[in-house]
Image (cartoon, grey):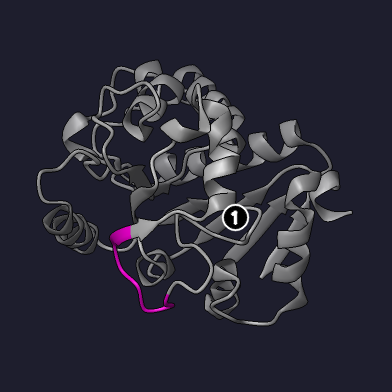
Amino acid sequence: MNVINLKDRTTASQYVAIELLKQIKSQPNAVLGLATGSTMIDIYKYLSELINVNHTKLNDVVTFNLDEYIGLAADHEQSYHAYMKENLFNHNSTWNEDNIYLPKGDAEDVEKECIAYEQCIQDAGPADIQILGIGENGHIGFNEPFSSFESETRVVDLTDSTIKANSQHFDNIEDVPKQAISMGLASIMNAKRIILIAFGSNKQEAIQQLLDGKVSESLPASILHQHPNVEVIVDDSALN
């Protein structure tokens, strides 16, 4: 695990955006694992700018998102479908909708949707780069503490701390969905390269626990110690 403190959010976000662009430029049919949340907003902004200034074609790039809230349709303003369009996909016309994968949170049969989504991930092959944030309780994706290290895409119950953290995006905490479809920890670990990003003092405790090196299902992100190619990108306040 390679930990890199890039001092501030801007520099760190630009670094991750450059790494994604390099992957796309060197491999036009790259498979990218993508995340959502406030950590990713600047990363996608800089990536979109770099794609446009380099006139990079994205027709063959394949993307898989980590998760989606259960019960939210793709056009719901707080769905991760809407987030990805607003922050990334709407900023370049050559993204190919046929190659963009997000779980369907309003699927009639969510269990069947989980199985189908996992199959799509496996059929596309391992992600060349998987981007991750980290929750205050150490979750990655929506894999909350004590998620099985063997887990694949499935329905998960969100913890109270995650619901509270995500309530900033909703009018009321009661509006925050209590469940989500999440890529599993085993699914994430199949990626060839993983970049985990953490900004802000509220991530200090989770990052410190991660860097302590103890591997335990009580800290889902600790599974990353078992992966051969992981970078942890932080700013000053997440590390100190």
**Image x and y of residue 151, in percent:** 35, 73
The picture quadrant where one finds residue 128 is bottom left
Looking at the rendering, which quadrant does residue 223 occupy? bottom right
Give the class, few, some or many, for how many residues have Cα within 10 Å of label 1's Cα (few <14, many ≥20): some
Residue 23 on the magenta segment: no
Highlighted magenta segment, given as a residue range? 148-155
Amino acid carrying label 1: it is Leu
Decide whether residue 154 is among the magenta residues.
yes
Above or below residue 10? Residue 218 is below
Q: Check the picture and name the quadrant holding the C terminus.
A: bottom right
Image coords of residue 67 (percent x, y): 36, 48
| Residue position for label 1 | 196
Instruction: Work out whether 57 lies above or below 188.
Output: above
Q: Position of residue 32 (x, y in %)?
A: 38, 48
Q: Is residue 191 left or right of residue 7?
A: left
Kindly tell me whether residue 215 is visible in this rendering.
yes
- Residue at point 36% right, 18% down? 90
Residue at (43, 70) in percent of width and height: 189
Give the residue at x 84% y 45%.
237
